Image (spheres, rainbow, N blue to C red):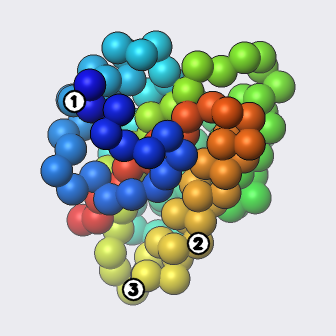
Amino acid sequence: MLLQTVRPNIVQSIRAYRVEDLLEAAQGVHQHFLYANLTAAQSKQDVLEGIAQAFMFPAHFGKNLDALYDCMTDLVHKSGTQPGFVVVLEQLPDNPRFDREAREQLLDVFRDAADFWAERKIAFRCFYSFQ
């Protein structure tokens, strides 16, 4: 089983994993699979909008990192018991408008979300790739 080889609360490069395999693995253990293909994104706002659309965030999503954290944690936590999460952020931009610092800030939100869910004994695995 693919997910048995990956720590339950981690944010890591997708590297050798295929999106299809991660989807199948998440479905196999009845976990949420959240996927965002960010190929068209060029800026932080584009990335946040792409994630919000792909993850079906509410219309009032504030399109900032704090709102992203809230949507990945409190909003979901308040909706009831959760089975776990496999998140894929594919093709994050790598350009001057979304530089290394911006990418790390975004990934820090997902690391914080992984910590939030770890405290609740819920698996939260996030995989990402760059353009």
Q: Looking at the picture, does residue 43 appear above or below residue 67?
A: below
Q: Which residue is mark 3?
A: 96
Could you tell me residue 24's position as x and y percent?
27, 21
Residue 37 makes an appearance in the image: yes
Residue visible at 39% across and 57% down in the picture: 12
Q: Secondary structure at mark 3?
A: loop
Whether residue 5 sits left or right of residue 57 in the image: it is left
Whether residue 64 sits left or right of residue 93 in the image: it is right
User: What's the residue type where badge 2 is placed?
Assistant: Gln
Q: CA distance from mark 3 to mark 2?
A: 15 Å
Q: Which residue is mark 2?
A: 105
> Badge 1 local density, few (<14 within 10 Å), some, or many (20+)?
few
Image depth: mark 3 or mark 2 in front = 2
Quarter holding the N terminus is top left
> Between residues 33 and 60, which one lies in front from this camera angle?
33
Q: CA distance from mark 1 to mark 2?
A: 27 Å
Residue visible at 24% across and 65% down in the picture: 131
Residue 58 makes an appearance in the image: no
Could you tell me residue 38's position as x and y percent?
36, 52
State how many labels appear.
3
Q: Looking at the image, tell me whether mark 1 or mark 2 is earlier in sequence order.
A: 1
Q: CA distance from mark 1 to mark 3?
A: 32 Å
User: What's the residue type where badge 1 is placed?
Assistant: Asp
User: Residues at badges 3 and 2 in contact (C-beta under 8 Å)?
Assistant: no
Whether residue 23 sits left or right of residue 80 in the image: it is left
Q: Looking at the image, tell me whether mark 3 or mark 2 is earlier in sequence order.
A: 3
Q: Which residue is mark 1?
A: 21
User: What's the residue type where badge 3 is placed?
Assistant: Pro
Q: Looking at the image, tell me whether mark 1 or mark 3 is earlier in sequence order.
A: 1
